[in-house]
């Protein structure tokens, strides 16, 4: 499978207490386990099954994911910014791989 | 041949699975209408990627926030789509994603509040080309 490269869109600055919108996407085939190959053999499931966003170590948002989420899973959600810090995103693959990305947010 | 007539309709069986999933999420409570809004297209030309979003009215304070929202697609091979978990730090209980729909069906979003109350919204999405299959 191609390497999974996360992409995130987070405002770099925010006012204290502001609710910001965050968009994330990771390229991944999200093989559902429902498909068959050309010989009729079932193709085993392999999906991203969990997505988590944490800010300075506190959980902001989490998604438990089933095969009905589209390929290249996209999540958009919000966060109230309490202070300057770092938001950390984590994607967990069925094969045990963990992909992560971080971005700083500065309170001005 | 006589037994064929006794088989439940596949659509009804799927709806029962979805209902069981929702009851597990709500702890057996029947969800009320209101407070949650599910936005989904009326017609999805491509069932492989259907944009959906949910929004729940809540102050999102430490005492009063939306714990989780479950998305259910009644007639997918597996009706479970995703469960979003929020915290007071979410600031608002809003989220969007893209999902697969095998065929025309009802999509449900169920919200569970901190106090245990549960709310649901439901939309039928007409699918031109189904996702999931192959």
Image (cartoon, rainbow, N blue to C red):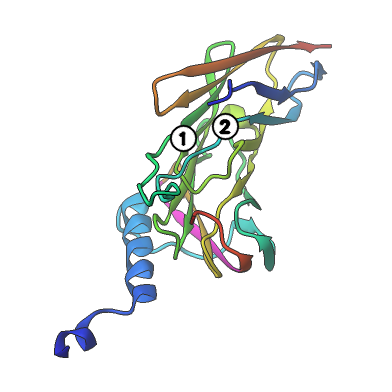
Residue B127 in percent (x, y) is at: 61, 67
Question: 10 Å neighbourhood of mark 1: few (<14), some, or many (≥20)?
Answer: many
Q: Quadrant of the C terminus of chain A?
A: top right
Which comes sooner in the sequence, label 1 or label 2?
2
Indicate the secondary structure of the residue bearing disc 1: loop
At horizontal 35% and vertical 75% (from top left) the residue drawn is B12
Would residue B44 be visible to someone looking at this image? Answer: yes
- Main SS, magenta region, reads strand
Q: Is residue B31 one of those drawn in magenta?
A: no
Instruction: Provide the residue span drawn in magenta.
Output: B116-126
Vertical placement of residue A106 versus A68, above or below:
above
Read off the residue under disc 1.
A47
Q: Point out the residue furthest to the front here.
A: A39
At horizontal 48% and vertical 17% (from top left) the residue drawn is A98
| Horizontal arrangement in the rendering, residue B120 relative to residue B19 (left or right) | right
At horizontal 32% and vertical 71% (from top left) the residue drawn is B13
For the residue pair A80 and A41, the one nearer the viewer reads as A41
Labelled disc at residue A28: 2
């Amino acid at each position: 499978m191609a390497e999974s490269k996360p992409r995130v869109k987070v405002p770099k600055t925010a006012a204290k207490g502001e609710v910001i919108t965050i968009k994330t996407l990771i390229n991944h085939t999200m093989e559902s386990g429902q498909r068959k190959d050309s010989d009729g053999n079932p193709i085993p499931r392999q999906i991203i099954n969990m997505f988590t966003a944490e800010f300075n170590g506190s959980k902001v948002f989490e998604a438990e994911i089933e095969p009905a989420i589209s390929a290249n899973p996209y999540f958009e959600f919000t966060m109230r910014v309490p202070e300057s810090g770092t938001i950390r995103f984590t994607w967990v693959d069925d094969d045990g791989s963990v992909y992560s990305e971080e971005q700083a947010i500065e309170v001005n | 041949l006589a037994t064929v007539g006794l088989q439940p309709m596949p659509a009804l069986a799927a709806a029962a699975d979805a209902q069981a999933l929702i009851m597990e999420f709500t702890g057996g409570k029947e969800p009320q209408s209101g407070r949650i809004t599910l936005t989904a297209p009326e017609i999805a030309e491509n069932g492989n990627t259907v944009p959906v979003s949910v929004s729940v009215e809540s102050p999102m304070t430490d005492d009063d926030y939306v714990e989780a929202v479950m998305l259910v697609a009644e007639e997918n091979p597996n009706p479970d789509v995703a469960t979003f978990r929020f915290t007071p730090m979410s600031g608002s209980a809003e989220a969007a994603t893209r999902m697969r729909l095998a065929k025309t069906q009802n999509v449900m979003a169920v919200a569970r509040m901190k106090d245990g109350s549960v709310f649901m919204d439901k939309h039928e999405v007409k699918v031109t080309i189904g996702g999931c299959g192959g």
